[in-house]
Image (cartoon, helix red, strand yellow):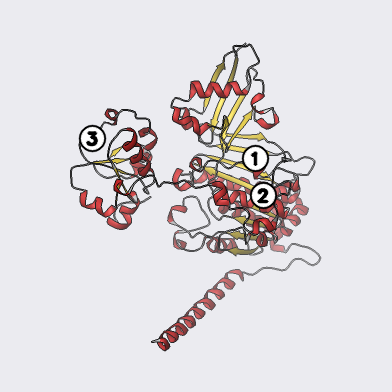
Amino acid sequence: MPVSIKVEFLGGLDVIFESQRYHKLTVPNNEDESPIILKNLIDYIVNNMISDPKDVEVFIENDTIRPGILTLINDTDWELEGEDQYELENGDVISFTSTLHGG
Amino acid sequence: MVNSSVEELKKRIEELEIENSKLKSQITQEQALPVEKAVAGDFLSLDEYKRYGRQMIVPQITKSGQRKIKESKILVIGAGGLGCPALMYLVGAGIGEVGIVDDDVVDISNLHRQVLHSTERVGEFKAESAKKYLVKLNPHVKIKTYPFRLSTTNAFNIFEKYDLVLDCTDSPHSRYLISDVAVISRIPVISGSGLKTEGQLTVLNFENIGPCYRCFYPKPPPPNSVTSCKDGGVIGPIIGLMGVMMAIETLKVITGTYTKENFKPFLSMYSGYDQQSFKTFKMRGRKLDCISCNYTLTREFIENGGINYSEFCGVVTYDVLNKDERITIEQYEKLRNSDHVLLDVRPKEHFEIVSFPGAINIPLDRLRRIEDVNQLGIDISKPIYTICRYGNDSQYASRYLNDHLKLSTKDVIGGLNRWSTKIDSEFPSY
């Protein structure tokens, strides 16, 4: 079954998503019927939500989330939840936030 | 000749010595506000009972917490947008000793957020300016200033005098340096940051069991993804709020609210717009493979220059144009009345603040999406010059226009800022 989730882009990351911080979306089923994981969401975002291919490097580096961006699954660091192998569930909130450095 | 110059130098030294002693006496005068002695057999004076009473009656602080606050020594690195409010509250709360590290001087562009400084102190070291305010706020607090840049060679000697450090700096390389030195020195770091309308806050290396900056960010961000307050802007109270929150976390660590048992690694995120939101994320613990936390890094290694922190974090190179693709500000002044197109590639908020009459604004990020020269909406038969605030983005703009759209544009070296300083001092710089 496809999963419906919320995605947030914080810390200025929304610039590559037409300045929209909050998105509701449905991640479609995988062709092989395997469980929908966070990696599928990242691919979905890259393929469907980043309108300018030049912006992909703001989000992705070496096939994963770029250094300096934290990924949170329901307000918890993705490292504690299996990183990109986490199985998405309906109602999950996935947040991506740039690290801020200014002081 | 030789003799006279020696004499001149002697005279100059004499003058400086007199000035120096005057300044010294000024400083001691400022510190010499009357401080009462503690009540016999107690750690507080009568003045301090009154001064700290309102916080001591709060169950989370109490009188024994006040003793811990008074016995603590904290180091604040950066007396800017975060450091100023943090220092105000911590000095007000009666910290025993406070060190302030900052090599920068007060600039008028700081004053909307760096609330310890003032218009009359523009040009003074921020550390000294901060001290002037703070000694008047609370003469019971001992304040030491370090008006120079924190470095791999001086950091350990400074850190070892303190129990806790507040990272109020503004770049990844200083944040890595502070974290590494704090882990090796076995002291916690209260870390805050902010930009535009958002801020972040965390406690690092708590009791030498909590995660450090490297645990959160093993790899530095690409340098072109790092934005400073100078370039990206910041709303004063946003960064101020983060500084105030850092003061709260500092008091909690000092008074023992957090313990080895109850401390959970976190990162809080405040967004001021559109709706206010404050989220606290549950974060990873200390990482076994962290080169800082597993003590692969040593004091000796860092002091001997084993890590070049600026190199580790990288720098953005703007050097993308050939000489014949650039003109100086003086050359542009001569061309100003000629028939040409001036393409201002700054973000629209910048363009709205001030711009040249007749300039056309296409922000760099929008410019880079233009694939067809006709979409530019400018007369490409005329000479085209690109300009920005400091002359960095204009180079990228000309590179893009010349390579992808086959134009032969030139950028104006130094941008609008140089126009203000070299050509027209009436032209606002911001």
Does the CB distance between marks 2 and 3 fall below 8 Å?
no
The disc numbered 1 marks a residue on which chain? B
Label 1, on which residue? B216
**Dot 1: within a 10 Å radius of its alpha carbon, few (fewer than 14), some, or many (20 or more) residues?**
many
Residue B16 percent coordinates (x, y): 49, 78
Circle 2: element type: strand
Q: Nearer the viewer, residue B134 or B309?
A: B309
Amino acid type at image mark 1:
Phe
Q: Which mark is residue B380?
A: 3
- Number of marks in picture: 3
Quarter of the view holding residue B394: top left
Q: Earlier in the sequence, mark 1 or mark 3?
A: 1
Q: Residue furthest bottom?
A: B3
Q: Of the two numbered discs 2 and 1 on the same chain, state the one appearing first in sequence.
A: 2
Residue B79 against residue B356 in the figure, above or below? below
- Cα distance in 3D space between marks 1 and 3: 49 Å
Q: Residue at the location (31% across, 38% down)? A: B402
In the rendered structure, the residue with mark 2 lies on which chain? Answer: B
Which residue carries the number 2 mark? B189
At 65% across and 40% down in the image, what residue appears?
Answer: B216
Label disc, if present, on residue B290 of the rendered structure: none
Q: What whole-number distance in Å separates the C-alpha atoms at marks 2 and 1? A: 13 Å
B427, A52: nearer the viewer: A52
